[in-house]
Amino acid sequence: MYEAFFNLNTLPFENTPDPRFFFGSEEHREALAAIEYTIRMRKGYVCVTGPVGTGKTTVSRTMISRCSDSARIVPILHGHEDGKQLLRQILRAVEVTYHLNDDHAILLEKVFTFLHEQYAAGEPVVLLVDEAHAMSDSALQELCMLSNYDTNRAKLVQVVLVGQPELLHRLHEPQMAALKQRISMVKALRPMTIQETAAYIGHRIRMASIDPQHLQVRFPGKALEAIFNLTHGVPRLVNYVCDNAMLLASVKKEREITPAMVQTVAADLSLSLVHNDFVSSTSDAPRLALAGNM
């Protein structure tokens, strides 16, 4: 609604995992690099965790856009009650026919045949498991079993586990020991610092602007501090606040976002109720007086 007023090609703060808007904070860059390294070097399993709204899905989608030239990436949904359901979803996702009465061994053989064919064709398979913390023990253990089909020289399948922090707790349970041992890298995403939050906002506005060199909206330092204090640097919450603040500013025909606008938006969104889990346990209280420009 406010694109024309702020000279934008698109809305800059949509809560969709669009790789065009990927912002490389230090932790997000490390997570993406870990995934890419695991896939391209065929290391097997990698795990990325983070609280709700910290950008896990955006990292995953960015990985798809960067790695799809060298691998067949297969998104896997959570919620499987057992290993057979997981195998069936894999086969559906790669369009391999199976029958409802196929037992576990037959399903596993069909998956293995597909993995081997893809490897021979130079397009190895990557299973991208989002919300992995919500998978059943049986489904997670089935993922582990897929590595049993690796050849002497290479791993036929790479697995990217993406989930909330409780995934790490589950991996430390005794029944998950075999899966834990197969994970070559673990990266944890946390909310952004105040400096990263300011850079994130500027990045998204520039990406959405028709003329990135002459931005038509400003977030002065006090407004940026107010946004950080309310959202604790959680990207999803930052998007909500900035989107609504820009809408309010456009209605007022103003090109500068003020702390008062941020507080108005926060009251409308009830952001005072944001859970403390969003606060990084390692971050200090903000001390930076940000400049008034981007």
Image (spheres, helix red, strand yellow):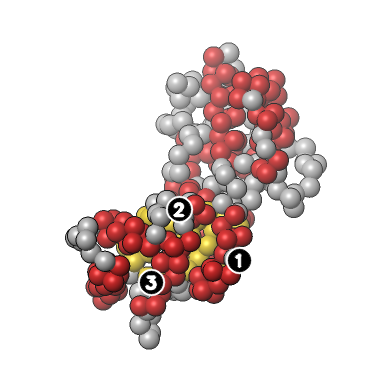
- In percent of the image, x 58 and y 13: which residue is there? 252
**Quadrant in the picture for the C terminus:** top right
Earlier residue among tags 2 and 3: 2
Find residue 146 and name its label: 3
Q: Is residue 96 above or below residue 223?
A: below
Q: Position of residue 172 (x, y in %)?
A: 61, 66
Residue 128 in sight here: no
Residue type beneath disc 1:
His
- Kindly identify which numbered label has been placed on residue 152: none
Q: Nearer the viewer, mark 1 or mark 2?
A: 1
Q: Is residue 178 left or right of residue 165?
A: left
Query: Which residue is the extreme one toward the bottom?
Result: 152
Q: Nearer the viewer, mark 2 or mark 3?
A: 3
**What residue is disc 1 on?**
172
**Residue 125 drawn at (x, y percent):** 34, 66
- Identified by mark 3, the residue type is Leu
**Quarter of the image that includes the N terminus:** top left
Q: Which residue is mark 2?
A: 130
- Determine whether label 2 and label 3 are within 8 Å by CB: no
Amino acid at the residue labelled 2: Asp
C-alpha distance separating marks 1 and 3: 20 Å
Element at badge 1?
A: loop
- Residue drawn at the location 74% of the way across and 52% of the way down: 282
Please rate how many residues cluster around mark 3, counting C-alpha atoms within 10 Å: few if below 14, some from 14 to 19, many from 20. Answer: some
Real-space CA distance between mark 1 and mark 2, rounded to the nearest whole angstrom = 19 Å
> What x and y, as percent, mark residue 186?
57, 64
Residue at image point 22% right, 57% down: 100
